[in-house]
Image: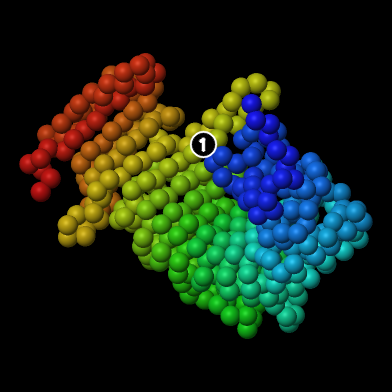
């Protein structure tokens, strides 16, 4: 068997390729066969031998194969390492992630001089930032009104999550970032914060707050930061190009009226374990319409009544998927998971919901019954199938599929739904082979009544 030559026999270019491949997010990356986390591979390889260290130090482009990740504590050594990283990476774009101690409660956060120095050094290179993630206890660069806007010409993705307990402080965030496409903000308290970002160029937007906000600076230029509180809110700002939006239910009443998303395809409203309902401002938002291209609507830990769901379906002609997710909360006293009662709708799949003449048309409605009273469910369906609902003229059902536990979908419920459908629908039982815990049935509108 031919012995394997030592690593120093390999050409420098070959070593560089191996190094870059090991650090890249490849399906067969080194993380799969080395017992190293992905974010530490670039740091561990140079510790193997001097040859790998030489490769890393000479080829500055390899410094871009991993994000610079810093976790507490902040020491003089961490500041020196940051200086070394910035020097070795030359003029290449930077990707980094800054994390603070997650176990430190915001009530007990104290100023840290070394952290301030660390952030000052990092902010000196804002012109090189490409992907920036901050999970910190304080904002990364607070800017006061009238100050010059930070210039970040290469920034494409910004994730900002800070946990500062704000009471009497004001934070204003504004920047000049022509390449910015993705923004993710998760703030502990945001009542005294103003945001002015290049909204019109974003394609991925996430706005999560633990409390509602008082103002968002919606400006396509940096001529101003916020509206005077006594002035009425302006008409919704049109944000072209945003296809994906995730928003906290607690902030929906403040954020939803401010924007119009003509290109939005997917909207997720997250209750963040507080089961907050976004209220009727959501239907107003859909009826303007501010999201004419909406196809996916997802509610997570957010209470939405069944009647409101049907109103939403009538206002979104292109919607084909509506989902409601309920996380299982654990009751430590009873030592068992608790499932909140979120109504009947768990997952609705809508197909072919637009007629040839472009009239909104809901054809297929699939309901997974996970909680609630079957009596209420049948009453709701009666109004929709018999056309007695106030919005029945806007919602046409060709197929209704109900499935769930046998206790919820009992024979009596099936018989009643079959009778209330009358001569308009054909009744059919569904068979779930190998799934004894689930039963179901469907109603199909007769072909002679579809015209």
- 81 left or right of 448 in image: right
Please state, as top left, top right, bottom left or bottom right, where the N terminus lies in the image.
top right
Q: Which residue is at 72% across, 42% downward?
A: 7
> Which one is in front, 359 or 376?
359
Here the colouring is rainbow
The answer to whether any part of residue 379 appears in the image is: no
Q: Residues within 10 Å of mark 1 (few under 14, many from 20)?
A: some
Q: Quadrant of residue 119?
A: bottom right
Q: Is residue 6 above or below residue 138?
A: above
**Can you give x and y, in whole percent of width and height, for residue 40 in the image?**
73, 44
112 vs 203, left or right, is right
What is the count of numbered marks? 1
Q: Position of residue 236 (x, y in %)?
A: 48, 71
- Residue 451: tell me if it is visible: yes
From the viewer's side, name the closer residue of 413 and 8. Answer: 8
**Residue 443 sits in which quadrant?**
top left
Residue 361 sits above or below residue 177 on the image:
above
In this rendering, is residue 309 above or below 137? above
Residue 31 position within the rendered picture, expressed as x and y whole percent measured from the top left = 64, 38
Q: Assign a secondary structure to mark 1.
A: loop
Give the quarter of the image for residue 211. bottom right
Task: Say which residue appears at 30% left-offset and 56% top-offset.
Answer: 317
- Quick one: which residue is furthest to the front in this view? 2
What residue is rendered at 67% in x and 43% in y?
A: 38
Q: Which residue is identified by label 1?
A: 326
Counting from the top left corner in percent of width and height, residue 395 is at: 26, 49
In the rendered image, the vertical position of residue 421 relative to residue 73, given as above or below: above
Judged left or right of residue 179, residue 191 is right
Measuring 48% from the left and 57% from the top, which residue is drawn there?
A: 244
């Amino acid at each position: 068997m031919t012995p394997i030559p030592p690593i120093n026999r390999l050409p420098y270019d070959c070593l560089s390729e191996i190094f870059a491949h090991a650090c890249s997010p490849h399906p067969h990356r080194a993380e799969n066969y080395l017992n190293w986390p992905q974010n530490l591979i670039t740091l561990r390889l140079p510790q193997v031998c001097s040859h790998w260290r030489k490769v890393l130090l000479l080829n500055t482009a390899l410094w871009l194969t991993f994000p610079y990740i810093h976790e507490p504590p902040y020491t003089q050594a961490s500041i020196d390492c940051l200086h070394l990283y910035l020097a070795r990476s030359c003029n290449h774009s930077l990707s980094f992630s800054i994390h603070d101690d997650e176990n430190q409660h915001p009530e007990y956060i104290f100023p840290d001089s070394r952290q301030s120095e660390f952030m000052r050094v990092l902010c000196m290179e804002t012109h090189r930032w490409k992907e920036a993630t901050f999970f910190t206890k304080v904002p990364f660069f607070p800017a006061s009104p009238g100050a010059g806007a930070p210039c970040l010409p290469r920034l494409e993705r910004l994730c900002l999550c800070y946990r500062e307990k704000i009471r009497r402080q004001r934070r204003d965030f504004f920047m000049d970032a022509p390449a910015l496409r993705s923004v993710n903000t998760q703030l502990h308290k945001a009542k005294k914060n103003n945001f002015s970002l290049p909204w019109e160029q974003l394609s991925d937007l996430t706005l999560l707050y633990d409390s509602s906000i008082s103002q968002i600076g919606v400006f396509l230029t940096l001529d101003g930061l916020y509206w005077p509180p006594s002035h009425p809110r302006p008409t919704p700002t049109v944000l072209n190009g945003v296809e994906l939006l995730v928003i906290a239910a607690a902030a929906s009443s403040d954020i939803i009226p401010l924007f119009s998303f003509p290109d939005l395809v997917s909207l997720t409203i997250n209750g963040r374990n507080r089961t907050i309902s976004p209220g009727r401002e959501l239907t107003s938002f859909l009826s303007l319409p501010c999201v004419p291209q909406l196809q996916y609507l997802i509610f997570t830990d957010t209470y939405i009544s069944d009647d409101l769901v049907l109103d939403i379906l009538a206002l979104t002609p292109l919607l084909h998927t509506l989902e409601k997710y309920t996380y299982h909360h654990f009751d430590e006293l009873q030592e068992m998971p608790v499932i909140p009662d979120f109504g009947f709708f768990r997952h609705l799949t809508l197909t072919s919901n637009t007629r040839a003449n472009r009239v909104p048309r809901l054809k297929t409605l699939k309901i997974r019954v996970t909680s609630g009273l079957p009596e209420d469910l049948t009453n709701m369906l009666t109004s929709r199938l018999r056309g007695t609902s106030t919005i029945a003229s806007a919602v046409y059902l060709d197929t209704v599929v109900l499935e769930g536990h046998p206790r919820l979908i009992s024979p009596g419920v099936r018989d009643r739904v079959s009778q209330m459908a009358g001569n308009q629908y054909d009744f059919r039982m569904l068979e779930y082979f190998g799934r004894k815990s689930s039963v179901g049935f469907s109603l199909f509108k007769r072909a002679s009544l579809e015209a």
